[in-house]
Amino acid sequence: MGIESYKDYTVRGFAKQMGDGSFEAFGTVQKDHLVLEASEPLGYYPTFDRAVAAGIAWAKAWVEDQR
């Protein structure tokens, strides 16, 4: 899991390892310890780090869309 602060929100990226060795990405957005939004699966990535980065990127985009 990766966690970053972004414009008064906490954004998180998650990676779930799949049976074939790839990683499925997810993201969440929190504010004041409350989860505001959680993604559906975002796709499959060859590494843990790339999947986490995709989750964080999704969460940052969600924040931008709310402004």
Image (cartoon, grey):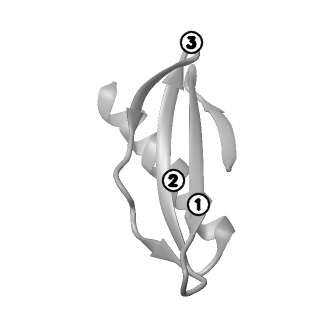
Q: Which residue is mark 1?
A: 15
Question: What amino acid does circle 2 point to?
Answer: Gly
Classify the position of the C terminus by image quarter.
top left
Asked if 45 appears above or below 2 in the picture, the reply is below
Q: Residues within 10 Å of mark 3 (few under 14, many from 20)?
A: few
In this rendering, would 46 be left or right of 62?
right
Label 3 amino acid?
A: Asp
The image position of residue 43, as x and y in percent, is 40, 69
Judge whether 36 appears above or below 17 on screen. Answer: above
Distance from Cα at disc 2 to Cα at disc 1:
8 Å
Residue at horizontal 52%, vertical 25%? 30
Label 3 vs 1, first from the N-terminus: 1
Residue at 68% x, 40% y is: 3
Q: Residues within 10 Å of mark 1 (few under 14, many from 20)?
A: many
| Residue identified by numbered label 3 | 32
Q: Determine the secondary structure under disc 1.
A: strand
Task: Give the labeled residue for mark 2.
Answer: 55
Q: Earlier in the sequence, mark 3 or mark 2?
A: 3
Q: Quick check: marks 2 and 1 in contact, CB under 8 Å?
A: yes
